Image (spheres, rainbow, N blue to C red):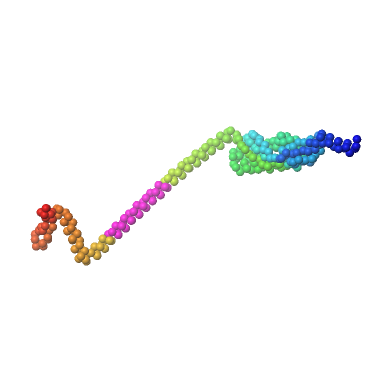
Amino acid sequence: MNPKIATVAIAVLLVLMFGQRFLHSVPAGHVGVAILFGEVQTEPYPEGLHIVNPFLSWVDLDARQDTFKISQLEMPTRDQLLSKVDLSIQWRLDQSRAPAIFRDTGDKDRIIAVHLHPKARSLIRELGTKIERAEDLFKDEVRDRLALELSDELSAYVANKGILVDSVLLRNINLPPVLAEAIGRKKEREQEVERQRAELERVKLEQEQQVAQSVASRRAAEEDAKRLRILADAKAYEIATINKAASGNPAYIQLQSLEALKKMAEDPAAKLYFMDSNAPSPLPLLNLGDAGGGRR
């Protein structure tokens, strides 16, 4: 057989037998770890398609951020009380060190069991002894400081192991029952005081509104009285001015007399008298009512 033909035939046979093994695709968000005859290779393989040694076997580790939750971690404080804390640890693999951590520890479940969980439990007990009283755990500044210290301490511990800690969150804190009941009663008293304070503020506001309304009503009455006085003064001034002007005007006096006679004439019972200064009593001149009847 021609040597060239034999070489091509062998190549084709190898491709048919091992074709897919020359390629390896690492899924998105993962890092590939290669193993050759049981030995972990030092080079990490990022996501994507790679041409590789067909004799390699593969472990693709999830490198995306993961959240590990721990419940009921015991945390003693300086007042000798034991509280229980729930934590959430957000972490991920350092892709550049994935082969080393897989070789030294194992997959993600092993990483949690060997590194994250034990260290978090140890730190929570250690940092709890820096807190004076268990009830201080309800203070925002204490909780924030505790979460920050947990994150910093845990990050420093696992950094050289190929683990990156993004944050540590305090999800829940359960105080000892005796203390929890005492705090509950204290909160109820504070709420009652706040309710009474709000009621006092409401009554005070209503009283202020009533006083303001009373003042406004009094001022309105004073303004009305002032306006009426001004109108009365203006009317009196008008009458006085007219009287003063008419007192020296004979025509005005004559007009007033004629208007009086007209009104008397319109009254059937009215009588008209002439006044004689020499007579003992007024002399009737004309009974307007009788005169009208006589004409009928």
Residue at 65% from the left image edge and 38% from the top image edge: 88
Outermost residue, top side: 177
Residue 231 highlighted magenta (yes or no): yes
Q: Which residues are magenta?
A: 208-236
Residue 95's place in the image compared with 246, above or below, is above
Residue 94 visible in the snapshot: yes
- Magenta stretch, main secondary structure, is helix
* Front position in the image: 264 or 87: 264
* Front position in the image: 53 or 88: 53
- Percent position (x, y) of residue 42? 79, 40
* Front position in the image: 131 or 172: 172
Residue at 88% from the left image edge and 37% from the top image edge: 5
Residue at 60% from the left image edge and 42% from the top image edge: 140
Q: Quadrant of residue 263?
A: bottom left
Give the position of the N terminus as an image quadrant.
top right
Direction from residue 122 to residue 54 in the image, left or right: right
Residue 105 visible in the snapshot: no
